[in-house]
Amino acid sequence: MHAAEEAGDRHFADHAYAACAYIPTYFGDPQGVLAHLTPRLEQATKATPTIAWMWGLAAMAHAALGDRDAFERANTMARNTLARCAPDSLTPSVFSFLPRKQAFYEARGYAELGDVEGAKEAASRALAEFDSPATINAVLTRLAYATALVKAGEVEEGCALAVQAIQSREVPGFAVMTRAREFNALVPRKAAAAQAWRETLAGVPVSR
């Protein structure tokens, strides 16, 4: 990030800056995410995929803190920023940020807030665009919707979807297992559907 700033490459510096928010995002530190991203977002004026990415990460952080209004504002900024981006900047490159990933973040945010309908609509948009149901983001999207279902008391449907999600990848990966364990903590121990889910989770191979 600092090397890109010294070289005058604002685009790459922003990308590195946004990527640094992954650590607090997946280690349960939403306040750390906001402390890291807010100063840059307050300065941003140009619409780029990376700025939209930062808004999406901030939206998830606000949702994790239970602040629906702040989540809605940040989520709207993510969507509006993407809409203002030059079309040729929206590519599958790791240096871009596509609407399908924004929709995944939106689904995750609604899941944190326990909004089943919001999570379902956003997850449907995301899943309709992913190239394969086995991509990490597609799996995470299904886990987000499954989380919303369990929070709403629809445990059987949520567990079935979560089983389908983690079984779609031979080795799920760190982000998937982090969300799977978070989901697992929400599942009532005595629920009939919980046994199949927990057996599946226990049998998942761990990457090394």
Image (cartoon, rainbow, N blue to C red):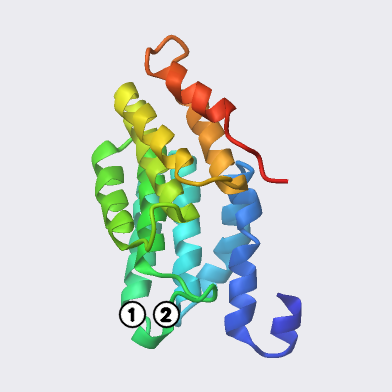
* Horizontal arrangement in the rendering, residue 134 relative to residue 6 (left or right): left
Q: Secondary structure at mark 1?
A: helix
Eyeballing the image, is 197 above or below 71?
A: above
Q: Is residue 34 visible?
A: yes
Q: Amino acid at mark 2?
A: Ala
Q: Residue at x 31, y 63 (%)?
A: 129
* Horizontal arrangement in the rendering, residue 23 relative to residue 197 (left or right): right
Residue nearest the viewer, comparing 129 with 17: 129
Residue 176 rendering spot, x and y as whole percentages: 54, 44
> Badge 2: how crowded within 10 Å, few (<14), some, or many (20+)?
some
Q: Amino acid at mark 1?
A: Arg
Picture quadrant of residue 196: top left
Q: Residue at x 39, y 58 (%)?
A: 132
Residue nearest the viewer, comparing 166 with 116: 166
Report the number of discs: 2
Q: Residue at x 75, y 77 (%)?
A: 2
According to the picture, the residue beneath numbered tag 2 turns out to be 47
Picture quadrant of residue 144: top left
According to the picture, the residue beneath numbered tag 1 turns out to be 84
Q: Is residue 31 visible?
A: no
Q: Residue at x 32, y 70 (%)?
A: 80
Report if the CB atoms under discs 2 and 1 are less than 8 Å apart: yes
Picture quadrant of residue 9: bottom right
